[in-house]
Amino acid sequence: MKILAAMLKPVRKITLLLIALAVTPEVTFGATTAEKYSDNSEEQSNEVSFRADEMDYDRELGITTARGNVQFTNQDRVLQADIIVYNKKQNFVNASGNITLLEPTGEVLFAEFMELSGDLKDGVIADFRAILKDGSLIAANGGRRTNGNLLDMQNAVYSPCKLCEDDPSRAPLWQVKAVRIVHDKKRQTIKYENAWLEVAGVPVLYTPYLSHPDPSVKKKSGFLTPSFGSTTSTGTFTRTPYYYNISSNSDATITPVFTADESVILGGEYRQKLQKGDFKARASIKQNTPEDERTYTAESGIAGIRGHVSAKGRFDYDKTWRWGFDANRQSDTTYMSRFGFKGDNTLPKITNTLASNAFVEGFKGRNYVNAEAYSFQTTLTGQEEDTIPIIFPLVDVNHVSEPNTYGAETTLDLNFLALSRQEGTDTRRLSVHSGWNLPYVAPKGDIYTLRAKIVGDFYNTKDLEVTSHENTSNYAHRLLPQVALDWRYPFVSGDENVYKMFEPIASVVLSPYGGNSANIPNEDSQNVEFDDTNLFSENRFSGLDRIEGGPRINYGLKWGVFGKRGGSTSFLLGQSYRYKKDDTFVVGSGLENNFSDIVGRAQASPGPMINVFYRTRLSKDNLEPKRNELDLRTGTPALRLSARYAFFDRQEGSEFAAREEISSSFSSQITETWRSSLGASKDIAEGDTRSMNLNLTYEDECFLFSSTINRTFFQNQDMQPENAIIFRFLFKTLGEVSQGLNILNSN
């Protein structure tokens, strides 16, 4: 549009004007004339100044006429034009020709004619254009200023989009044309009357009234842009969120969702920043339909109601202590997933459960204390809630001493656990682990670390099921010493391009056999993942309930090449040997025999465009893979590939079956504004595709369009496999409009 196109030329004048204000002296000589006027009144004292190539002053009338590169300044406002006439007695200013008015807020106004008060706050403007603080553009045939705050424009247009440099007369990507636009700086709003939204110059939407915050607003109460669409679960829906700015440090969003097939869903979010912390909460509630009553079980105990709540708080007591909580709860197992609240979960799912916890922790020097409590809710149909534990409390105390003269450190780790169930085993556990570490570097460069440790664990249980012939007791304990010696010998060489490293590693661990009585429950050490990360660990179990005993030796080899300008390649290969078998490790763990399986990893990143990571566990007998993980990332922003393959053999007694799966994604930054992605995941073991998705997105400084196709294959109670087509439109500075369509999977 010509009005907006004309704004490109004035933009260049802004920089020149700012430079001139910085370097031009108050009084100049030669062809330039400078004048100062002082206007004193009871209310205020205003000083105005002129700069111009030519200047005439009529003392009788009190009129100053300035021509050529005129600059008129009143306090922190600057007016520049070809001609300016200032009437001191009547206190008004007439300006014409290439007018630029620089506001103290950073806004810049352009016009061909202005008639303003002497303080430049009030008056009328013809052929008006403006650049707002965020770069948005406003143009109008005419306008009126009031008190420097209100700008009332007639036959105006607004757009945050950049104009085409090759063809400035072409309409921007989108703009709002209105019979009237009012920019109220005090209330920080831009209002429109009888407005049309135009996309690529084509009118697409009419509204008699429209309002949105101006660029200076960070938070302001009001209705947000509604969204609408259709889903399998709800049918056609409309969301109408209302944002409430409660205070400078708190706000809320209330979102009623009106649906065709379901009752109204009322959602809300509350956020608050505190001096020493923050808090946020999300919740929703809906009345059941007759179909709801037939398809789900009300686990909440509240008849006729479904809903959820998720809350998170983090608070600092002082520099040492802080506390917080995460609360997650839903009325039934599928509610959050079915109605689109999965992202509200403040903690990640743990074995298909929602977790809630509260904690207190302290940090001081080399000391750490943590006390917390957990409760869980299942997200899978058929899982017994009565068997899910409540943990209260779980206490950890950790201390590491300062190194002594020889570099030795002592450690002390205390743990107390109380775990209760309505049905099943209740456990009380106290663990005391004390350690001592001494590093040593030999004259030839090999590195030794001597470690000594005493492990003490004490248990009290109730309703413990014991399958062995061992006598059942509610009390159990163990006291196990450990001594370990680590050795590694890094050989390093290099030239002007690379460093090379070759490092043999070995560790010897001595400890008594046993220590895993049948009277000790196993709550946190049920699954062992033997890999390169715990090859040299004293205890390969992930928790405290099980401990690895007996003499053993761990050995491996590391090799790597590292480029001085970036890039690297490395690998690790290792194995463990124990004098006697340890039946604590189940078949399939890779540790059940004297010689363990072989574990390894390899990483290659020769340049910024490719990275490969591989982890494996091979059978000691025939080198058959028991675990394979491959991650590949390659390409440039124009075309990037990410792929992951994972295979895990099943362990005896594990709740997880053997898994073999692959996932991949392609992404492309097609142009500066267009990008796309394609992704899929498949369960190779079962032969089933888990999910597929395709996305195409356009985004620039003022507009975003996104289209996504998703296909999921999961089914749980009232959640069916489904296809989803989602369209998203975002008009930046105005708000967001989104539309989605979910189609039930026919398979």
Image (tube, rainbow, N blue to C red):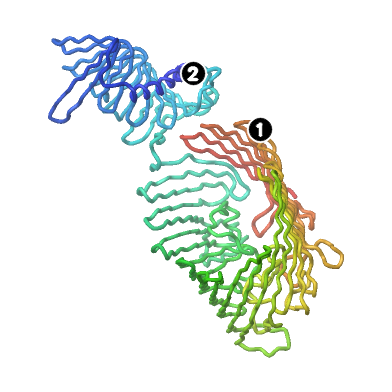
Seen as rendered, the residue at the extreme right is 622
- In x, y percent, where is residue 186? 31, 35
Of marks 2 and 1, the one in the foreground: 1
- Tell me: residue 633, above or below residue 556: above
- Tell me: residue 570, above or below residue 17: below
Q: Quadrant of residue 739?
A: top right
Seen as rendered, the residue at the extreme front is 443
Seen from the viewer's position, the closer of residues 726 and 632 is 632
Seen from the viewer's position, the closer of residues 689 and 634 is 634
Does any portion of residue 134 appear in the rendered image? yes
Which secondary structure lies at badge 1? loop
Seen from the viewer's position, the closer of residues 235 and 56 is 56
Does any portion of residue 631 appear in the rendered image? no
- In x, y percent, where is residue 173? 54, 26
Q: CA distance from mark 2 to mark 1?
A: 28 Å
Point 67% across, 59% down: residue: 716
Point 58% across, 57% down: residue: 335
Seen from the viewer's position, the closer of residues 32 and 562 is 562
Q: Quadrant of residue 224?
A: top left
Point 56% across, 18% down: residue: 166
Q: Amino acid at mark 1?
A: Ile
The reply, left or right, for residue 490 in relation to residue 20 is right
The reply, left or right, for residue 172 in relation to residue 476 is left
- Label 1: which residue? 670
Considering only order in the chain, which callout, 1 or 2, is on the residue closer to the N terminus? 2
- In x, y percent, where is residue 685? 79, 58
Check disc 2: other Cα within 10 Å, few if <14, some if 14-19, many if 20+: some
Q: Which mark is residue 1?
A: 2
Check disc 1: other Cα within 10 Å, few if <14, some if 14-19, many if 20+: some
The reply, left or right, for residue 606 in relation to residue 622 is left
